[in-house]
Image (cartoon, rainbow, N blue to C red):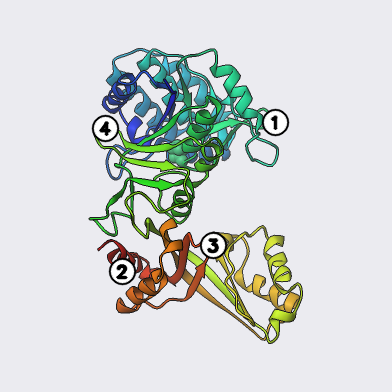
Amino acid sequence: MGIKVCKFGGTSMADGNIIRSVAKIVNSDEARRYVVVSAPGKRFSGDIKVTDLLYECSDEAATGMKRSEVFSKIRTRFLSIEKEIGMDIGLEAMLDEIEWNIVSGAGKDYCASRGEYLSGRIMAAVLGIPFVDAADVIQFKADGSLDESTYSLMASVLKKYPKAVIPGFYGKGVDGKIKTFSRGGSDITGAIVARAVKASLYENWTDVSGFFACDPKIVPSAKCIKELSYQELRELSYMGANVLHSDSIFPVKAAGIPIRIRNTFRPQDEGTLIVDSDVRNPEGNVVTGIAGKKDFTVILLEKSMMNAEVGFAANVLKVLCHHGISFEHLPSGIDTMSVVIENKYLEEVSLDDILQEIRDAVHPDYIHTRESVALVATVGHGMAESVGTSGRLFKALSDAEINVIMIDQGSSELNIIVGVDNEDCAACIRAIYREFFG
Ligand code: ASP
């Protein structure tokens, strides 16, 4: 029998009752041997995720506060979970120690990681299986990326435990201190565990019944995708479909382990299976899914004979590189080039300064910017073999009177990306959905 690694997200750990349902799910299948958990999430709309409280707490601690107001909310939250599950697992003492460490300057990542740490302790007690601290099995390199030695280290530790709970979201840095992944990173931990134990399946349990062809908040009747490929998932997650962290694909893809998205609140639903494939999905759709992300800036450059100027693009990109800005897209013509960057980069450096540096570096005839741009990606392996897909897409957008600012299609024909005004983002997704899914 193959091993299943199950990761449960924040809403699956939100209170004692839900945690009991999680235990039932785990215990209903002997193959579910390794369990990765997130910190308790929202119980109702308006509730605050424990991780968000922990970040607030670390900000408080940074100001030198010796008694954290916010930490008392976290304490209450965990103690009520302990009460709801009806077990004494010694959380009070753990909370005391954590609070002490936080006010003594343990740092932001340590603080943020404690939600997962305590969730893991709770889950291990409820399941009656060992707790393996992620800090002992996940290692980061000095540049912040995952140290590949994690896989052999984790495999050798987990070999000793037929079943275990591992907290998500963090590991240890080269300085021996706790280090976290980016937000939503417990998905990455689950994928790493799956690869380390050579799992036959990585089950990612959340609060939706799978991956939808587009955001159900935009199209309430959006259909659930039965199967998609790692690449399609990566493209859609990256562009805002936030069921799974987009970086969680890499560990499982490298080992060919399928992922299944499941719903803790509807375990009877089949969910979505993510597999290694580069062909049209079994449902036969040309388009697999559509996702959109707002808040990009497009820098448009024009210069006569740009095509003959060796190093033009490199010199523009050097300016961005100098400011630590990575670009998203680079559509270009003979004498034009557009660079698309995320607005978040413009919080640290002003757009005017960047434009001036580009002017000095490449002397364009014309430089212009367009802010508040949303990118909408239409994704699907089926597009490569279907004539007329882009025609259908652009006709749908023109019928919906949506102005397309930018177009980018990779040569793999896996996606077509259009830039539209932020305000047109939802309408754009709706129009494309209607065209391809009816
Ligand atoms: N608790 C962390 C967050 O809220 C990590 C996770 O849930 O995956 O981002």
Residue at the spot of label 2: 431
Q: Quadrant of ligand 1?
A: top left
Residue at the spot of label 4: 267
Q: Report crowding for label 4: few under 14, some 14 to 19, many 20 or more residues within 10 A (C-alpha).
A: some
Q: Is residue 260 above or below residue 122?
A: below
Q: Earlier in the sequence, mark 2 or mark 3?
A: 3
Taking the image as drawn, is residue 251 in sight? yes
What residue is shown at x 41% (from left), y 69% (from top)? 387
Residue at the spot of label 1: 175
Q: Earlier in the sequence, mark 4 or mark 2?
A: 4
Q: Is residue 266 above or below residue 360?
A: above
Q: CA distance from mark 4 to mark 2?
A: 32 Å
- Label 2 amino acid? Ala
- Image spot of residue 219 (x, y percent): 27, 59
Q: Which of the labelled discs sits on residue 159, or is there none?
A: none
What residue is shown at x 29% (from left), y 41% (from top)? 209
- Helix, strand or loop at disc 4? loop
- Label 3 amino acid? Glu
Q: Nearer the viewer, residue 5 or 362?
A: 5
Q: CA distance from mark 2 to mark 1?
A: 50 Å
- Image spot of residue 292 (x, y percent): 41, 61
Q: CA distance from mark 2 to mark 3?
A: 24 Å
Q: CA distance from mark 3 to mark 1?
A: 31 Å
Q: Report crowding for label 2: few under 14, some 14 to 19, many 20 or more residues within 10 A (C-alpha).
A: many
Q: Is residue 195 above or below residue 326?
A: above
Q: Is residue 178 above or below residue 375?
A: above
Mark 1 or mark 4, whichever is nearer to me: 4
- Helix, strand or loop at disc 3? strand
Mark 2 or mark 3, whichever is nearer to me: 2
Residue at the spot of label 3: 342
Q: Earlier in the sequence, mark 1 or mark 4?
A: 1
Q: Report crowding for label 3: few under 14, some 14 to 19, many 20 or more residues within 10 A (C-alpha).
A: many
